[in-house]
Amino acid sequence: DLRYFVGVSGVYDNGLRPLSVDAAGKLTPKLDLYGVEVSAGAYGTHNFKRSQLGLDYLGSYRRYSDAGYYNGTDQSLSLRYSYQSSRRVIFQLHETAGTFTYGNTGVAASATTGSGSALDQSAIFFDSRFNYLQSTASLTLLQSAKTFYTISGTGFLQNRKETIGLTNSWGYDLTGGINRRVSRATTIGVDYAYTHFEFPAFGTLSDTNAFHGNFTTNFARAWKFSM
């Protein structure tokens, strides 16, 4: 059901960018940091009669020889629970949470990999403490062997400890879609997504409406084409 691991590494980092500037107003990157990192984690799934629980956790503690500002811990946790109440109804819950100091660590990479990620690693511009939380609930209805509907809702929060010049953000999205298997090899579908973001420190917000269409077909047994 579960697998565990632990490791110790020697680390070297350069080019880190804290949210600070020098007397001339230029960013002050940190260069040539040496240290030690201890990491541990657990991952796996457990199956019940009608449900499944999945866990993916990674944590680390890092200490540098002459840069105490970047000493500390990074944590990433993902929990997923799926419950099939009947032959046609599947309910899922997904919770992700974490904290890290900068965006190029293994913990940050694991947190930003995969569909439904709570954050985008490329959007972490400065190397300062960053916390996040995301909760998702979805419901899938299997109308028949050929047609199924999916609706879901997600809420997320991103918290940055550096409050001068950066802003926290929060938001939510609502999605719904339908997929239909039109032949033994081909499936088509459409879905709609509404997303809302707010950035309190800047007093701004944004809303997005997106429509998607998809087409997937299998051919020659071993090949799949999707669009």
Image (tube, helix red, strand yellow):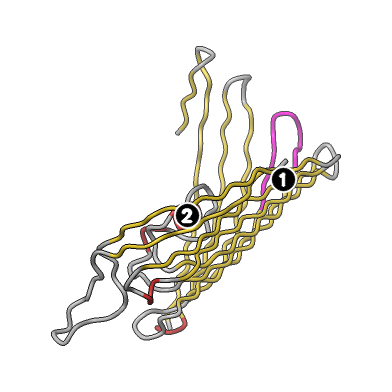
Is residue 96 inside the magenta stretch? no
Q: Which residues are magenta?
A: 141-151
The picture quadrant where one finds residue 67 is bottom left
Instruction: Locate residue 128 relative to residue 45 in the image: left or right.
Output: left
**Coordinates of residue 49 in the picture (x, y in percent):** 86, 39
> Looking at the rendered structure, which numbered label has been put on residue 132?
none
Cα distance in 3D space between marks 1 and 2: 25 Å
Amino acid at pointer 2: Thr
Residue located 53% across and 68% down the image: 132
- The residue identified by callout 2 is 112
Q: Quadrant of the N terminus?
A: top right
Where residue 6 appears, x then y in whole percent?
56, 50
- Decide whether the magenta segment is chiefly helix, strand or loop: strand
**Residue plotted at (38% across, 79% down):** 166
Residue that numbered label 1 is attached to = 140
Return the x and y of residue 2 as percentages of the image width and height.
69, 44
Name the image quarter holding residue 22: bottom left
